[in-house]
Image: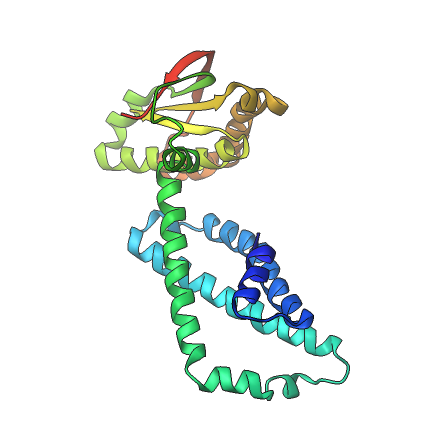
Amino acid sequence: YGLLIAAFFALFQAETELEWMLVYASIGFAFGFTSRWLDYLLYLTHLRRRQFFLVLLVRSIAYLALLAICIVGVLVVFSWLDRGTTVGELFQRSTLIDWLGGGQAVSSIFFSFLALVGIQALVLVSRLSGPTKVLSYFVGKYNEPVEEERIFMFVDLRSSTTIAEKLGHVKWHHFLNDYFFDIGRPVRRARGEIYQYVGDEVVISWPKEQGLRKLNCIHCFFWIYNLMNKRRDYYLDTYGFEPIFKAGYHVGTVIAGEI
């Protein structure tokens, strides 16, 4: 996607020379490819549990820095491939100097940052409510009630009342928050959607075909189970309890629609 967008952007900038088309396309590809890994690294931190504005700002700055690295990196590689051009000569070219000194660089960085803020805001909001829900809302999929076949998995914590009473309200909330936070990764890996939280229960849903593909819905349970085993020491050290859960499945026809 990054490669195609960058190629169209080059045409928009009236860059029709093959060399510059390749430069733009390479920058788009490099940014698109590496941004996937940046997103993964940012996800591994607890940044997404901070205030929305702080998360938005940090992510936007990180992506802007990555874009700058990709641009410089691609220019360096192309200068190296062009045996007659050194890196120093590349950065002394009149076109580049005019761009840097004519105010275009500042405006490009500013508008790139604004674009990244908008994109990151959309990403964060879609993750909050679920990417498929946001997409469905935009395309109007559930504007009218739709009959669907879906698989549901109901995941319940055991002894939750006892744990809540012993931890107290605030610590119990942190316990649940950590548990729900950890569950998110296996659910996404299994292509599931978290439909809702009901107290300590998590309701996960799949369209029937998606849930049965590669047995996603079954694997989801064991991926959560394995992750909880890996995180067992953390929960015991932090709360004195570990999340032990049970799950039930159901499949059938439901009516889905916007309220």
Q: Compared with residue 13, is residue 57 higher up or lower down, i.e. above or below? A: above
Q: Quadrant of residue 181?
A: top left
Residue at coordinates 61% horizontally, 61% vertically from top-left? Answer: 30
Residue at coordinates 76% horizontally, 85% vertically from top-left? Answer: 84
The colour scheme is rainbow
| Relative horizontal placement of residue 232, taking residue 202 as reference (left or right) | right
Q: How many marks?
A: 0
Work out which residue is located at the far right of the displayed protein and give it.
83
Q: Quadrant of residue 159?
A: top left
Q: Quadrant of residue 91?
A: bottom right
Work out which residue is located at the far left of the displayed protein and give it.
169
Residue at coordinates 49% horizontally, 82% vertically from top-left? Answer: 99
Q: Compared with residue 69, is residue 151 higher up or lower down, i.e. above or below? A: above
Residue closest to the eye, 187 or 70? 70
Q: Position of residue 71 (x, y in %)?
A: 57, 70
Q: Compared with residue 1, is residue 250 higher up or lower down, i.e. above or below? A: above
Q: Position of residue 63 (x, y in %)?
A: 46, 61
Q: Position of residue 244 (x, y in %)?
A: 43, 24
Q: Compared with residue 93, is residue 217 higher up or lower down, i.e. above or below? A: above
Q: Position of residue 157 (x, y in %)?
A: 38, 22
Residue closest to the eye, 105 or 31? 105
Residue closest to the eye, 112 or 204? 112
| Relative horizontal placement of residue 92, taking residue 244 as reference (left or right) | right
Query: Which quadrant: the C terminus?
Result: top left
